Amino acid sequence: MLTVPPTASQPTPLLVVDDGKTERLAVTIPLQKAGWQVASAASARAALLAMARTPFEVLLVDQHLPDCLGSDLIALMVREWQPPPRAILLSADRSARTRAAANRAGACAVLTKPEPTERLLSLLAEHGPVAGDAPATPLLAEAQAQDFLTGFQIGQERAQWVTRWEQEVASQLAELRELHTLGSAAAHHSIKPALHRLRGSAAVVGAGRLGRLVSTLENDSDRAGEPASLEALLKIAADTSVALWARAKFLPPQN
């Protein structure tokens, strides 16, 4: 008897990442019949965009993708999504090196394909979400994922792009600190426009957490320059930078 996901009334979203159409169907069809909500992607880029749009809780990833290794993709997703999705490497590559790379990346299991359907479903039930788990959500906002990738596709240098964003945000945070220190009526009047510019910088890269905090401070500009608020802005901006660098280093350069 096939094992079904923990809550059949609310199918668990699962993403299959494999560049082989036959291989994707061989995994997708049995999972759908067993009650899983399954989508598929043929590349790491497609998987990133799919994850930005849908909070997939479980990933089945092939090792040899056209644009990166599956273990590298797992490492990125485990690092960038909070809470991280459960990731299983499902590959014909039986090497100890691949298995070790997947384990280092944070995969909860490594399976060799073609894996028997019953065994795969049993493992998914074992490692799948439990009642009460919150779905994985990306640090980068879904609406900006495509724009962010397009920035690289039009030939922008990855390091320069992220560095420029970091410098821009650092300047905006310094401006907010200075305005609060001045304490004059004119300075206070300038805080909202400064916050608006910072919110724009957050939107460029889809930094949802940073944008939401800035919006809150726009509605309460008296708090905007307080040390606690500035510290919170600085912390979230730093977290965003980490995610930006992880993504920038992961994506291959465009020809």
Image: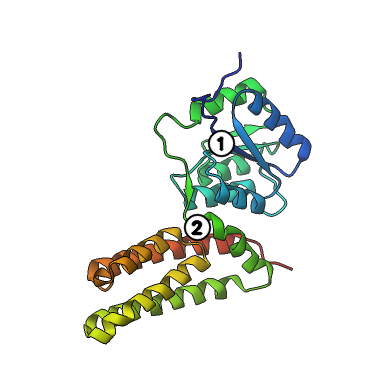
Question: Label 1's element?
Answer: strand
Q: Nearer the viewer, residue 32 or 254?
A: 32
Question: Label 2's element?
Answer: loop
Specify the quadrant of the image occupied by residue 102: top right
Q: Is residue 145 above or below residue 92?
A: below
Residue under the image location 53 percent in, 49 percent down: 77
Kindly report the distance in space between the C-alpha atoms of the residues bearing marks 2 and 1.
19 Å
Position in image of residue 32 (x %, y %): 65, 28
- Mark 2: few, some, or many residues within 10 Å (few <14, many ≥20)? many
Residue under the image location 22 percent in, 85 percent down: 184
Specify the quadrant of the image occupied by residue 249: bottom right
Residue under the image location 56 percent in, 45 percent down: 54
Q: Is residue 22 left or right of residue 36?
A: right
| Tag 2 near tag 1, CB within 8 Å | no
Image quarter hosting the N terminus: top right
Position in image of residue 112 (x %, y %): 66, 32
Q: Amino acid at mark 1?
A: Pro
- Is residue 113 at all visible to an observer of this figure? no
Along the polypeptide, which appears first: circle 2 or circle 1? 1
Q: Is residue 128 left or right of residue 46?
A: left
Q: How many marks?
A: 2
Q: Is residue 85 above or below residue 148?
A: above
Residue under the image location 74 percent in, 68 percent down: 255
Residue that label 1 marks = 13
Q: Is residue 127 left or right of residue 64?
A: left
- Is residue 226 at all visible to an observer of this figure? yes
Q: Is residue 105 above or below residue 177?
A: above
- Residue most extreme to the top: 1
Number of the label disc, if any, that sits on residue 255 = none
Q: Amino acid at mark 2?
A: Leu
Residue that label 2 marks = 140
Q: Is residue 186 above or below residue 173?
A: below
